[in-house]
Amino acid sequence: MATSFSLFNFVVQDGNGVKGMVDILGISEVPEQYIQPPYERIDKENAHSHGLPPIDLSKLDGPDHDQVVNQIAAAAETLGFFQVVNHGVPVELLESLKAAAHEFFGQPPEKKAVYLKGVSPSPLVKYGTSFVPDKEKALEWKDYLSMAYTGDVEALQHWPNQCKNVALEYLRSSINMVRKLLQALLEKLEVKLDDSEIDALIGSKMVNMNFYPACPSPDLTVGVGRHSDMGTLTVLLQDGIGGLYVKVEDNLEIPDQWVEIPPIPGALVINIGDTLQILSNGRYRSAEHRVRTTSKEARVSIPIFTMPKPAEKIAPLPELVKRDGTVAHYREFVFQEYMNNFFGNAHEGKKSLDFAAMPST
Ligand SMILES: O=C(O)CCC(=O)C(=O)O
Ligand SMILES: [Fe+2]
């Protein structure tokens, strides 16, 4: 007797991913499991492109320092997203990273499946699909590879060969920029942290590679559902295809308004994560964002997530709360608890922040 075929098992458990589903099963319509409820679908027609020019980070070290700090802080206070150029990450490296992502995901599924959760030879490396497949109403049209950083030696030993050198170089050259951005953001808050305190806010680092295969009906699916990133700052490299949408701060006149972060050759995208929203007591905004799929060709994106170490205690910066004579909007917690909550639930916009919100009295 033939056993019934489970698409979920084929994609998720067997590690074929969305890419395997498209390539091997040759689907021409979006399977039911991937059809989003209407309110989660991304309306391309009504969203416009984020028009602000990228911020030139080379000017942070010159006479325009204050002006650049103001631009960074203004973006962090409003949209929570901005783009940067002259960021110190070599532009050729950006091209090599995108090529490495295509090379990794272009392998046969069984080569990638060795890194599935539960069987991966290293706890640092995880390959998977969708965010939390067991808990999602509809699956995300995305496969990913996650590489946690604990040191160069471990990375070179455990990260997949196709990407380890470029991913490590990307991380190395980005971290300097992340430190500078944090310094600028703290400068604007008039909070002084020494280098070791700044490093504690980005003590954990992770490089991901996202792969979004071409989709027969982008109107019905999402690449990534609405979420904010949990960490401090995210650096994101996207390719030229586009599809990253950010929610504009709730505006009573135009509710549910989204802007697309357009691909700019050579630029990197920066966004504020929940941790920085909490540390700044709400002054900087972690941005709600999501990704649309495309029918044209596969899209790749390569984020670096920076966050505190799991044991770190996080709360609004005390000097900020005291000086402003306000109340803390978030409670203190251990970062590991925040991570457990974040990875224990499907994406649902900025709901992740409720975990840290002060109970209303
Ligand atoms: O693919 C993108 O542009 C964004 C991906 C993303 O939001 C994430 O991995 O957290
Ligand atoms: Fe994200």
Image (cartoon, helix red, strand yellow):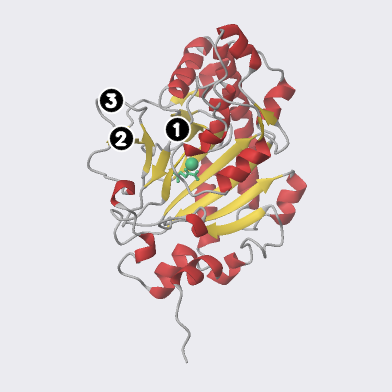
Tell me which label, 1 or 3, sits earlier in the chain: 3
Q: Amino acid at mark 1?
A: Ala
Picture quadrant where residue 159 is located:
bottom right
Q: CA distance from mark 1 to mark 2?
A: 13 Å
Task: Sort mark 2 into few (<14), some (14-19) or many (20+) by Cα contacts within 10 Å.
Answer: few
Q: Position of residue 119 (x, y in %)?
A: 67, 65
Circle 3 residue:
252
Give the label, 1 or 3, closer to the camera.
3
Q: Which mark is residue 256?
A: 2
Q: Position of residue 191 (x, y in %)?
A: 62, 13
Q: CA distance from mark 2 to mark 3?
A: 9 Å
Residue projecting furthest to the left:
45
Residue located at (58% from left, 58% from top)? 127
Residue 318 higher or lower than 81, as above or below: above
Task: Sort mark 1 into few (<14), some (14-19) or many (20+) by Cα contacts within 10 Å.
Answer: many
Residue 53 higher or lower than 115, as above or below: above
Circle 1 residue:
287
Q: Position of residue 187 (x, y in %)?
A: 58, 13
Mark 1 falls on what kind of element? Answer: loop
Mark 3 falls on what kind of element? Answer: loop
- The residue nearer to you, when weighing 123 against 5, is 5
Would residue 191 be seen by someone viewing this image from the given angle?
no
Mark 2 falls on what kind of element? Answer: loop
Residue located at (66% from left, 36% from top)? 335
- The residue nearer to you, when weighing 284 against 238, is 284
Q: CA distance from mark 1 to mark 3?
A: 18 Å
Q: Amino acid at mark 3?
A: Leu
Q: Position of residue 240 (x, y in %)?
A: 39, 45
Tell me which label, 1 or 2, sits earlier in the chain: 2
